[in-house]
Amino acid sequence: MKFYILKRLFHSIFVLVGISLVVFIILHLTGDPAALLMPMDATPEQVAQFRKEMGFTDPLIVQYGRFFKGTLHGDFGLSFRHSQPALDLVLERMPATIQLTAAAMFIALIIAIPVGIISAVRRNSILDHIGMTGALLGQSTPVFWLGIMLILIFSVTLQWFPSSGRGDIWNLVLPAVTLGMFTMARTARMMRSSMLEVLGQEYMKTAMAKGLSPRMVILKHAMKNALIPVVTIVGMELGTLLGGAVITETIFAWPGVGRLAVQAIYNRDYPVVQAAVFLLATIFVLVNLVVDVLYTYLDPRVKLE
Amino acid sequence: MSTLENAAKSFEFSGEDRRVARWRKILRKLRENKGAMFGLVMVLAVIISAVFAPFLSPHDPILQDVEKRLIPPVWQTGGETDYLLGTDHLGRDIVSRLIYGARISIVVSVSAVVFSAILGTIIGLLSGFYGGNVDNIFMRIADVQLAFPFILLAIAIIAVLGPNLQNIIIVMGITGWVIYARVVRAEVLSLREKEFITSVRALGGSNGRIIFRHLLPNVVAPIIVIITLEMARMIIMEAALSFLGLGIQPPTPTWGGMLADGRVYLATSWWLATFPGLVIMLVVLGINLLGNWLRDILDPRLTQL
């Protein structure tokens, strides 16, 4: 067990180094980062001067070494636009993104799990058909269009919810539903098939034969086991949510990391882009590490290779 | 003619008959499945729109006409029969733009899917067949890539390289290879030890021959299933990039670009943003339904996808 966790930890560190390498490479894709980082109207002398100052004339491996050292200290350089450390800017926006992602995950699970259970228990009933058709639609709807349609219906027409910004709980509803829809749909389908599998097991018959009430059997015996595979999906879905947050935040003018990153890309503010991408990816890796470890506790059958 | 040859011939015939019978069976199953039929119709509709756009479009999709600005759909007051779904803020016909938009959507997503399928399949074959370090390196790269929010990575790379057709296809293609590699690798791992592979090896078959003549044909079914399901994701991704202004640039009509334009006029002209999104959703839904059906008949083990 300890060995497994250590191995998983080592693995995560390797992935983080890989991430820093990719983040570093993005800036060097065009061959000349100085051209990207300097303002459009800079003279060739200024560019040459800048190139020297930043050490872009050094071999790539030396530059990466420097970048990686900076990353370890949380130093991604100064934002060109706000002349603040890039990491501070990103960290400032982090609570908004975490709030949105958590709310989306909460809405997704609170709806998806009951829908999945009901669909499995009442298989082929009208409820099952409605639930699964809804899930299929939810999986096929582009996030950005869903957001716009929710604004059209609930902000512009009905004026129930505000269409943008972050403030009280009302501001959170539309972005969280938008962001959570895909995960909700996928989890509902997962929960249904996982539940169907559990319901077919012998121990379910035993539980029924013991004379337990069907409600008890479903909630205590079946649901608990059916939730196990769904837990891993939740870890993977976090990546979908963090990615989706980039678009959702843009649509709802939600002041999170995703929106900051997109604006930074448009402003050619690359230190901020690097810090944001690195931080989002790191969160994903860490959460998955935790989920994997939790998983081995939940389901001791998982082989600890 | 010897009896042996006759016998061989009859075998050939029965083989062909069996193949015909198999196709008949698949077609019959397709007719029975309403969802898959809907999917097929949607897919054919998009392909036909893309190929015959100039003949199907009632108007020029990029021709601007100030006098025809923001005409509502035909069923609303002020609608004109000439413009079934109305016009946009520059007086361009929505129907024509939707039909032409299918071109970019299809070209980009098909190319990206083919690119990622080839890349992922080769990596999966090599990883599974050679194992060891080759496998380790590829699978760690896959982990690193899965840790990134795709869309953010794609946005960052395209913003650096510039949004042209080639860059968009390459970047989208690169974001998709992991799933093929993982599935093909797992498949090859189990095939590798099978007797028919051992016998090819005993007969002196080279590694290349084993990989491409004997392993590849056995992983085609899962690849087809993934290709269909990935098509849906790529269509959404292309639209998302266009929506963010990083897709194929105007005036070329794209569904995502139309949505972005429409967002600005949401309060006054709902049809601008509504129809492109509806088209994306129907197409993606169709592909998903077709993909689910293909999965069920070709490779039911892939239900996790």
Image (spheres, coloured by chain):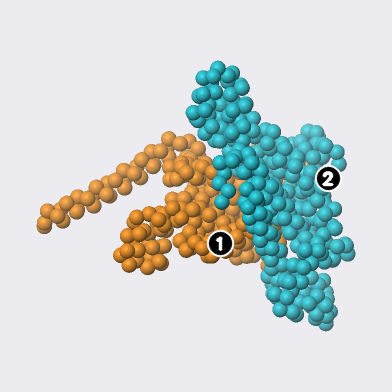
Q: Is residue A79 left or right of residue B96?
A: right
Colour of chain B in the image: orange
Q: What is the distance, in whole Å, between disc 1 and disc 2 at their CAs? A: 45 Å
Chain identifier of the residue bearing label 2 in the image: A
- Residue A21 to residue B35: above or below: below
Q: Which mark is residue B136?
A: 1
Three-letter code, disc 1: Asn
* Closer to us: A194 or B284: A194
> Where does label 2 land, which residue?
A165
Three-letter code, disc 2: Gly
Residue drawn 85% across and 53% down? Answer: A92
SS label for mark 2: loop
* Closer to us: A159 or B267: A159
Residue drawn 81% across and 47% down? Answer: A96
Percent coordinates x, y for residue A157 in the rendering: 77, 35
Chain identifier of the residue bearing label 1 in the image: B
- Residue A141 to residue B218: above or below: above
Colour of chain A in the image: cyan
Q: Is residue A39 visible?
A: yes
Percent coordinates x, y for residue A131 in the rendering: 60, 31
Percent coordinates x, y for residue B92 in the rendering: 67, 52
SS label for mark 1: helix
Q: Residue furthest bottom?
A: A45
